[in-house]
Image (cartoon, rainbow, N blue to C red):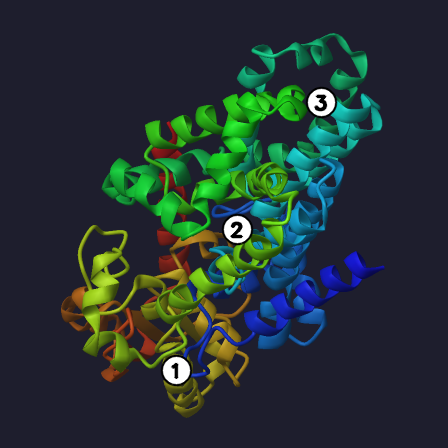
Amino acid sequence: MKKHIILVALILLKFVIQYQLISPIYDLHRDEFLHLDQANHLDWGYLSVPPLTSWLSYLIMILGNSVFWIKFFPALFGALTTLVVWKTIEELKGNLFALIFGSFCVTFSVLFRLNTLYQPNSLDVLSWTLIYYFIIKYINSEQNKWLYFIAVTFAVGFLNKYNVAFLILGIVPAILAVPERKVLSNKKFYYSIFIVFLIILPNLIWQYNNNFPVASHFKELAETQLVNVNRWSFIKSQFMFFFGTFPVIGFGLYALLRYQSFRKYRLFFFSFFITIGIFLFLRAKDYYAIGIYPIYFAFGSVYISTFFENRAGMVFKPLLIALPLVFFIPVYMLAFPNRSPQYFVNHPEKYRAIGMLTWEDGKEHQLPQDFADMLGWQELAQKVDRIYSQIPNPQNTLVLCDNYGQAGAINYYSKCGIRAVTFNADYINWFDFTHEFRNLIRIKNSWESDVEMDETSPYFEQSMRSDSITNNYSREYRTMIFTFINAKIDINKRVKNEVEQERQRHLLSVK
């Protein structure tokens, strides 16, 4: 009963803190807008992510599309990750100290930051942790039901984020190196693989029918973002994710080699380094690897608890339990958008020191990229609404943006029911040509806006620079809003041609 009370209190504390980490100054993140808009275009796949996020977005839309529910689900997945670590420690025969200490290490960590945004990452980490837990359950019992649990969890994780495939790439070679490889002769193992195939088949069919856009997405990612990933920075980030408590993971890895009670779990030692090695080889983003770590806090906390079975433990146990919370305090002060943008601009040194000012383009900016991606969106939507409402017959107006953040933000915040689109990301498949467009509102990135008037105005009777984003802390600062009235050409035909060209570009990039 005491353990259950502590667990429930920890989970409630997780939710309370999670909702305090973002200042109301900030809007939603650009990625959140795209994921939320997928609720309006349910399908078995998307150019950017697998389909599960769209189903969650549809549920959020039913619940009212409020910020509370948008933030609820990543917080829930973070809380469930803590729960799975707790259950893993119980499975490893850990005592109350190990339960509290291991759960604190996971809760007061980078997961607070990861769980602030509505992205597939939170469920991805939960999927990794849950699969590892089921593997431990299977090793302990050799009951085939755990193979099916692993299969279903992997399939759900795959439909959430393809990143979970790297877990398998790390586990399979590790299994071959340990006695547990006997599972490969178990026919139920292959039944579980078939279950995975059946669950993910609709997404595979969608990928096939759409020329495997995941391949072009990964190629574009590798050419524009991953090429800027420094492998040494990747390694340093792993320590920063679990600032102050990473040695617990080290103890867990050591115990997997030397602690007699953990010998049957040795495959986790090998899989850890294999998976990290694969991420390093591919120049993966640092946060891709976060899902690896929670389970190792379970091993580490149980092993550390064996050191304090005497009177000395009465002193050191409370200190160790407080350690994750103590180390989280400076992280809370640094890693969250809980201060005004001006504060970050006035105090750049500490953020520069830990690399937070360096964006995915490899350059240093005045705000962390994620924070700059949470500013200027309501301003954009309000200004587009005002312009849209002043146009005669606004229902015949195409709102065309340069990126998915702009389109998604307008669609989320608009009070006029605007359905903005872009040639970027999944929006390339969401153009609605049931209206005959006569007017155009064009949202153009600042570095490309100079030629927009010269290129587009000849095709319309009226043309004007209507407004721009004035929040200089926003990543979209100086983004221009152009208005073009009464087209001289067939806009629908022109845009359809551009949509087809963009789709062909994606197809060619795969080939």
In the rendered view, would you say 86 is above or below 211?
A: below
N-term mark: 2 or 1: 2
Q: Position of residue 219 (x, y in %)?
A: 35, 35
Residue 377 seen in render: yes
Number of numbered labels in the structure image: 3
Q: Is residue 215 left or right of residue 101?
A: left
- Give the amino acid type for the residue marked by disc 1 in the picture: Val
Secondary element at image label 1: helix
For disc 2, the marked residue is 121
Identify the disc placed on residue 205: none
Q: Residue at x 26, y 38 (%)?
A: 232
Q: CA distance from mark 3 to mark 1?
A: 50 Å
In the rendered view, would you say 148 is above or below 358?
A: above
For disc 3, the marked residue is 193
For disc 1, the marked residue is 384
Q: Position of residue 172 (x, y in %)?
A: 58, 19
Q: Position of residue 175 (x, y in %)?
A: 60, 16
Q: CA distance from mark 3 to mark 2?
A: 24 Å
